[in-house]
Image (cartoon, rainbow, N blue to C red):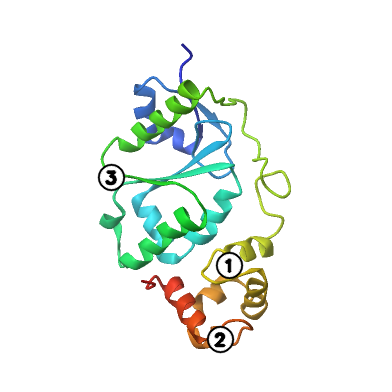
C-alpha cells in the first residue's frame, strides 16, 4: 500500500502540524505552493490558518480579498482554522465573524472546518488525504506545484487587480457586475468601498437606501 502523500509549502513544513502528520505516517513533500499550505490531491488545496490569524483578517476585512485569491488558486479549496476563533476575538464582533464564515461557505462554496482541539487539524488533513487518495483513488503530483488550471491566465491569479476587486464586490449582497464597476469607479478601490457609509453608497446608480443600509451592515459585520 502506497503511503499517503501531502504537499506542504516550505514554511509550514517546520510547523508542529507537519510533525504530527509525519507521526501518522504521511509523506510530506515540500513544494512552492501558490497560496495554500497543503494539497491532498492535484485539485484540492487547504488554506491552513491559525485562529488568531484568521480573526486578524476578519477584523481588518482583508478576509474577503484573500478568500477570492485562494479560490482562484485551486479548483477545490478548503479552509481549516486551527483553534477556536471565539478565543481570539480581540474586539472583532461575533457578527463580523459570522459574516466572514458565511462569505466563505455560502458566497464562495468553500468548506470551512474549525479544528478547535489540539491535533485535530492534523487529523482532518490525514482523513482528507486518506479518503481522496485511498478511498477515491485521486492522485497527488509530487513535482513542484504549478498554478491551478481554473483561472483566467493559467497561473492561478486573476488577470489584473481591477478584475479581482470587481469579483470580490459581486460576492456582496445585491451587487452585480455593473454595480461593482460603479463602486470602483466612485471609490477607486475596496478600501474606499468598505469605508463608505450608507448615505454615500446611495450616490451609486442602482443602490437605494435599503440596499445601501444592507451593504453597510454586511461590511461592518452587523448584518443580522
Residue 176 at least partly seen:
yes
Q: Residue at x 59, y 87 (%)?
A: 203
Residue extending farthest top: 1
Relative to 157, is 21 above or below?
Answer: above
Residue 158 position in % (x across, y down): 67, 54
Residue 45 position in % (x across, y down): 52, 39
The C terminus: image quadrant: bottom left
Q: Are marks 2 and 3 in contact (CB under 8 Å)?
A: no
Label 2 sits on residue: 202
Label 3 sits on residue: 116
- In front here: 155 or 203? 203
- Image mark count: 3
Q: Residue at x 41, y 57 (%)?
A: 101
**SS class of the residue under badge 2?**
loop
- In front here: 205 or 149? 205
Quarter holding residue 128:
top left
Relative to 27, is 168 above or below?
Answer: below
Residue 168 position in % (x across, y down): 58, 63
**Comes first in the chain, label 1 or label 2:** 1
**Comes first in the chain, label 2 or label 3:** 3
Residue 92 at least partly seen:
no
Report the side of 21 relative to 35 (left or right): left
Badge 1 density bin: few <14, some 14–19, many ≥20, Cα 10 Å: many
Residue 150 position in % (x across, y down): 66, 44
Report the side of 29 relative to 59 (left or right): right
Q: Residue at x 58, y 31 (%)?
A: 42
Q: Residue at x 41, y 33 (%)?
A: 125
Closer to the camera: disc 2 or disc 3?
Answer: 2
**Comes first in the chain, label 3 or label 1:** 3
Give residue 169's mark: 1
**SS class of the residue under badge 1?**
helix
Relative to 66, is 162 above or below?
Answer: below
Amino acid at each position: 500500500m502506497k503511503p499517503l502523500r501531502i504537499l506542504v509549502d516550505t514554511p509550514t513544513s517546520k510547523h508542529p502540524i507537519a510533525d504530527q502528520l509525519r507521526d501518522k505516517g504521511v509523506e510530506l513533500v515540500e513544494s512552492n505552493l501558490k497560496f495554500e499550505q497543503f494539497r491532498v490531491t492535484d485539485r484540492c488545496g487547504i488554506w491552513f490558518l491559525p485562529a488568531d490569524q484568521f480573526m486578524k483578517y476578519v477584523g481588518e476585512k482583508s478576509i474577503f480579498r484573500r478568500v477570492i485569491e485562494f479560490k482562484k488558486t485551486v479548483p477545490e479549496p478548503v479552509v481549516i482554522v486551527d483553534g477556536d476563533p471565539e478565543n481570539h476575538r480581540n474586539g472583532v464582533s461575533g457578527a463580523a465573524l459570522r459574516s466572514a464564515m458565511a462569505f466563505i461557505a455560502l458566497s464562495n462554496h468553500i468548506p470551512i472546518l474549525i479544528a478547535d482541539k489540539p491535533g485535530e487539524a492534523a487529523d482532518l488533513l490525514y482523513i482528507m488525504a486518506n479518503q481522496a487518495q485511498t478511498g477515491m483513488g485521486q492522485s497527488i503530483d509530487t513535482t513542484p506545484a504549478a498554478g491551478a488550471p481554473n483561472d483566467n491566465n493559467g497561473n492561478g491569479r486573476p488577470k489584473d487587480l481591477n478584475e479581482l476587486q470587481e469579483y470580490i464586490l459581486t460576492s456582496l449582497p445585491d451587487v452585480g457586475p455593473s454595480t461593482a464597476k460603479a463602486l470602483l469607479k466612485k471609490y477607486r478601490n475596496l478600501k474606499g468601498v468598505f469605508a463608505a457609509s450608507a448615505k454615500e453608497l446611495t450616490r451609486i446608480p442602482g443602490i437605494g437606501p435599503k440596499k445601501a443600509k444592507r451593504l453597510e451592515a454586511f461590511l461592518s459585520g452587523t448584518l443580522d
